[in-house]
Amino acid sequence: MSKTRLSFATTFIAVTSLAPAAHATLDLETLTATQAAADICAGKYTSEALVTAALERAKAHPELNAFITLDEVGALRAAKSADAARKRGRCKPLEGVPVVIKDNIEVAGLPASAGTPALKNFRPKTDAPVAAKLRAAGAIVLGKTNMHELAFGISGYNTAFQSGPQTGVRNAYDVSKIAGGSSSGNGAAIGSRIAMIGLGTDTGGSVRIPCALNGCVSLRPTVGRYSQKGIAPISHTRDTAGPMGVSVSDVALLDRTIAGGNAIQPAALGKVRVGVAQAFLSNLDADTQAAFDAALAKMKAAGVTVVPVDMPQLMEINGAIGFPLALYEAFDDMVHYLKTNGSGLTMAALAKEISSPDVKGTYDALVIPRKLPGPNNTLVPAQPAYAAAMKTARPALQKLYQRTFRQHQLDALIFPTVPRVAMDATPDASSVPNFMTYIQNTDPGSNAGLPGLQMPMALGAQSKLPVGLELDGPAGSDRRLLAIAMALEPVLGRLAAPKR
């Protein structure tokens, strides 16, 4: 197995001298992207000052392993250009605001490694459409963030790239814990207030899990709402890019930038109906259970109607979809991506250099030979299970959701995003049992193609780690979920930045 371990200095693109310290009044602990864009537009401070502050904060926290590439030169150049253009009367929705982008999303001129050594020198010539829309709206790309290798995991324990002394992307609130995955670096960077917004990807929970564990907000949009071009894939049926931010308004701003539409107003909570299904409430640790109970009480007090719902066989139906779908599509989708992205790599060359043992094992034993785990520790062909998932199980799952939303007249289902707070950052964090535990609640909606919104609801009473709340809505209800979350945010409260 080939490993690529880069020092903090050599991982980062050429360093330039920072701009003068004109950011003394910037409070990155509380600033949102929405407020920053308005402030820059009003001339309260410059994009250069904000980007400089973000770069300094990123370099002050190498222990997070949040970045694979920090583009100091490019970010400052873009910030100065934005400042100069604004003097000529231009002002864009994300004017001069730094954004972090997961390293499986292509940004012209910057490496797009997908967190794996074989792609570390691949520099696409064009932006992925989702990245292009952010830059066209005035966002400044601060850098490309670290991730679970090839997006195949929930821990972010990537052995290939690190800037700090310890392996894996680390939690913003406790560096001995995981940051979650697979959009790990985004979660750590936003949770630690290096950046206010980011763009990740989500196949089975990969923008929601890191935000649950790092105290940020994220949206897995309805599948198909955003373009997937220029993004290293796992599964075309399940994959989607997803916005991440410190506040609901920031995520709504990113969604509007990518998908269009007018500004979203907070929902009237007295007209909101949400359902709670027991299927999502198993395996909760004490902090998560207590935080969810408290959140429900606050929501009811604010006028939200909360109704219990039954979703029979939800997890059983979902179990027949997740692995067969993702593992089978992963081969063809990655082969196609490598043929068309200009990297010149083959699937065999990519797989040969995979660093993380869990991902290496998955590719060698399952993805490449097109196999699935069978009874008695055997491996069986994946195609029959995939065909059954697409023909029978997935439609049944979608009908179950549709029936539940319709019968109970629900705006959303609510549940803890993950059953447990962040675990210790060790190789065991990437084990199959831990993977299954952490995707327990995010996976079903992913397989059904539904939108899911994660927002913080508390710091755990004992752990002092973030606990997340998810709202899953009917297909196409993305803007309604954002409106509800916007109204819930002041009820539940935004988390304070981590103390360091």
Image (cartoon, rainbow, N blue to C red):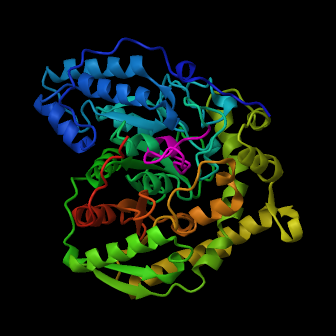
Question: Is 175 in the magenta?
Answer: yes
Considering every residue shown, the one lying at the far front of the view is 462
Q: Quadrant of residue 433?
A: bottom right
Q: Quadrant of residue 36?
A: top left
Establish if 338 lies above or below 424. Answer: above
Residue 38, horizontal then vertical, whole percent: 16, 38
Residue 26, horizontal then vertical, whole percent: 21, 32
Question: Is 176 in the magenta?
Answer: yes
Q: The N terminus is located in which quarter?
A: top right
Q: Quadrant of residue 194?
A: top left
Establish if 41 lies above or below 245. Answer: above
Seen at 65% across and 48% down, the residue is: 426
What's the magenta region?
167-187
- Of 196 and 111, nearer the camera is 196
Residue 46, horizontal then vertical, whole percent: 20, 25
- Of 370 and 73, nearer the camera is 73
Seen at 45% across and 74% down, the residue is: 289
- Of 196 and 125, nearer the camera is 196
Q: Main secondary structure of the magenta part?
A: loop
Q: The C terminus is located in which quarter?
A: top left
Task: Determine whether, in the image, residue 135 is placed left or right of residue 319.
Answer: left
Residue 414 visible somewhere in the drawing:
no
- Of 206 and 343, nearer the camera is 206
Seen at 42% across and 80% down, the residue is: 276
Residue 357, horizontal then vertical, whole percent: 75, 44
Task: Determine whether, in the image, residue 270 is placed left or right of residue 456.
Answer: left
